[in-house]
Amino acid sequence: MKVIRVTSALFAVVALTMGGPAHTQFENVGTIDFPTSATEDAQQHFLRGVAILHSFGWKQAIEQFRAAQAIEPDFALAYWGESLSYNHPLFPEADAESPREALARLGATREERLAKAPTARERGLLEAVESLWGEGSWQERRVAYMDAMARLYVQYPQDDEIATFYALSMLSGARALGDDSLRLEVRAGAIALGVLKRNPTHPGAAHFVIHAFDDPLHAPIALPAAYVFSEIAPAVSHARHMPTHIFIQHGMWDLVSSGNQSAHDAAQALWQPGDSVGDAVHSADWGQYGDLQRGDYEKARLWIDRLEAIIDASEGQARAVMTLPLMEARYVVETEEWRIEEITDETSPHTLLATGLSAVRTGDIETARMAEAALARRVANGDSGGDMRSGAGQRWVQVMHKEVAALVRLAQDDADGAVRFMDEALAIVATIRPPNGAADPVKPAYELYGEILLELGRPEDAAARFETSLLRMPNRPRSVLGLARALEQMGDKEGAAEQYEILSAIWDGRDSFTGLQEARRYLMSRN
């Protein structure tokens, strides 16, 4: 049985045989060893498909698996791979029929399909996806798949592909179980790190290390993998985007911006009418967040224009439509260019939050009360704010309501009421897994609480909130600014100067920002 390594040389040969420009963009997608019973021509397409699948390049992976099927119609793993290419394993199931249809093309029954897997290893992999696409809820099936992959991992402990897919199955299983303890993520990450040590350009290992350690505590473990993955698959949008999960966790705003720009370009280059716009939208969302943190407000507005163009081109795909109010609200809140929107029954929770903050900050308390009441109705109706993780999304809407309610109480000189609502907001935040991306909600609760406490003349308490905010979201400039102000009011001149230096470095060259001007004045006053 021949082992074929997926290398750039192999890709060049494959690209020439396929003849289309969309395929030649994928000459570099990493290195894997995945021996199978296939003929050499089918194996080349299969390996290419698995490598791209590891980077979540769904459409392009399907093309490769189907090319392998065309060469060798009874090649069971080509259908196995295709079945894994229709659903994001870390989101709720979107399409159960397409993977089942793919398997049905191999054979009408489970027994008929398994009979076409000539080795125990291939049969084990096929049996695992039979569990994934069999009977039961998607949560039950993902847990059954994880259990099947665990058995294979025990049976083939030296097999890096089984190890990698097992690691991903645990990441998926954690979501299916609603397990936010991170125990499955840490185990998955440890396994993926082992694969990456043995194969430093394995796309799945680098990718899943990032997913496994995508939280403030563990993110430093994944930083080397993020750098590796950023170079593995330059034409796969998700592969360009994914390292920015770790760059965000480190407050590396220039890399967050450039990584998502690259991801957006890759998504746009491959998009055709009828395709999902998910990769382009997701990279626009995160790219805007990065540019807002680095103070590039012009680029942040450009991301909104790009999203509007995506909505037009895709004839209003839901993912794009739901993301627009989020990005518009984020721009208002991060820039503090306050803007009040009309409040209707259809107004997004994100817009209500931005309008509530804007109304309080501009003295329009009546509109702020309306925003608070509208958010209360959203909470009562179980609104998730468009978040695909409905449980977490519903809790984030609850936090948004508490934030606006606290600001209304602050404006009414009800300090106790403002503090009570923010304490309730933090209690909800504590029930949600740690941050792993752009701020949610667009005004982080710890940061807002710090700002409220500063207004109430409680700098020590404010400093504690800002410090927690920065532990959760390092290098966030508005939390850095808040901490600098709190420390200055406490009389900690050295500490304040340190934070103002950090802010000056983040916003270097953005002369129009009040916060940067404040930092420079303070630092100059100490010279």
Image (cartoon, grey):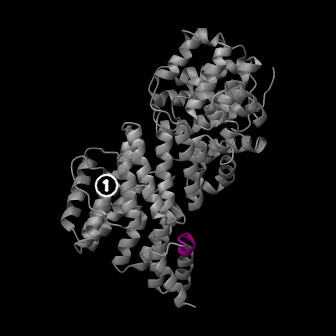
Image position of 172 (left or right of 423): right
Q: Residue at x 74, y 17 (%)?
A: 37
State the residue position of label 1. Answer: 351
Image position of 34 (left or right of 60): right
* Residue 256 magenta: no
Using the rendered view, name the quadrant where residue 168 is placed.
top right
Magenta part of the chain:
503-508
Vertical side of 284 occupied by 276: above or below? above
Q: Is residue 202 visible?
A: yes
Q: Position of residue 338 (x, y in %)?
A: 32, 66
Is the stretch drawn in magenta largely helix, strand or loop?
Answer: helix
Q: Position of residue 315 (x, y in %)?
A: 37, 36
Vertical side of 440 occupied by 390: above or below? above
Q: Residue at x 41, y 56 (%)?
A: 429
Q: Nearer the viewer, residue 14 or 191?
A: 14
Image position of 283 (left or right of 399): right
- Location of the C terminus by quadrant is bottom right
Image position of 347 (left or right of 29): left
Q: Position of residue 64 (x, y in %)?
A: 63, 25
Q: Secondary structure at mark 1?
A: helix
Vertical side of 450 occupied by 84: above or below? above
Q: Position of residue 405 (x, y in %)?
A: 27, 62
Q: Residues within 10 Å of mark 1 (few under 14, many from 20)?
A: many
Using the rendered view, name the quadrant where residue 47 is placed.
top right
Vertical side of 208 occupied by 141: above or below? above
Amino acid type shown at disc 1: Thr
- Location of the N terminus by quadrant is top right
